Image (cartoon, rainbow, N blue to C red):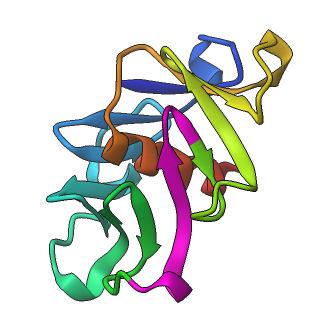
Amino acid sequence: MNIFRGNSSLREDQIANIRLNQVYLGYRNDQASLLCNIRNQCIYKGSSRSSRDILFRLRNNNVFRGNIPDMTNLVCHIHNKAVYRDIQRKKLICTIIGKRLYKGLSRELKDVICHTNAEFDIVELVAILYVMQLAE
């Protein structure tokens, strides 16, 4: 799966790609461009699978920083194709429509944060948001 900035599908706008549960920067898929890997509802740093290298853990649609699923480590909450900054769903970050992530509740092309060329699951969404955070 390829991840593109905004609504563009040009190669220079490709932010990252996910191949075999590994997330690579840009369009390359070599060890030098490996950002993180996805395994068992967790996103690990680089190619590591050690619990001390967990960047994010997904539990019950809540995303936690690190290995400890504690509310002080809450990064975001995912509910009904929307990503919120808090569990009370008061601070909306983005919405998911098909293969696109939009700012807030917008559905306009100018507000597309990024899009992919394939359907993605929740763990891949977390990886996409992590890559978007790095891209900013």
Q: Which residue is at 16% across, 37% downward?
A: 20
Establish if 15 lies above or below 89.
above
Q: Kindly indicate the quadrant of the structure image that contains residue 54.
A: bottom left
Residue 38 in percent (x, y) is at 24, 54
Residue 75 relative to residue 91: left or right: left
Q: Kindly indicate the quadrant of the structure image that contains residue 41.
A: bottom left
Q: Which residue is at 50% across, 83% downward?
A: 71
Front residue of 75/16: it is 75
Q: Which residue is at 35% across, 28% downward?
A: 120
In the rendered image, residue 76 lying in the magenta stretch gets the answer yes
In the rendered image, residue 99 lying in the magenta stretch gets the answer no
Residue extending farthest to the right is 110
Residue 40 in percent (x, y) is at 14, 59
Q: Kindly indicate the quadrant of the structure image that contains residue 76.
A: bottom right
Q: Which residues are magenta?
A: 70-82
Front residue of 78/42: it is 78
Front residue of 63/15: it is 63
Residue extending farthest to the front is 88
Residue 45 relative to residue 47: left or right: right
Residue 121 relative to residue 48: left or right: right
* Quadrant location of the N terminus in the rendered image: top left
Residue 107 in percent (x, y) is at 75, 15
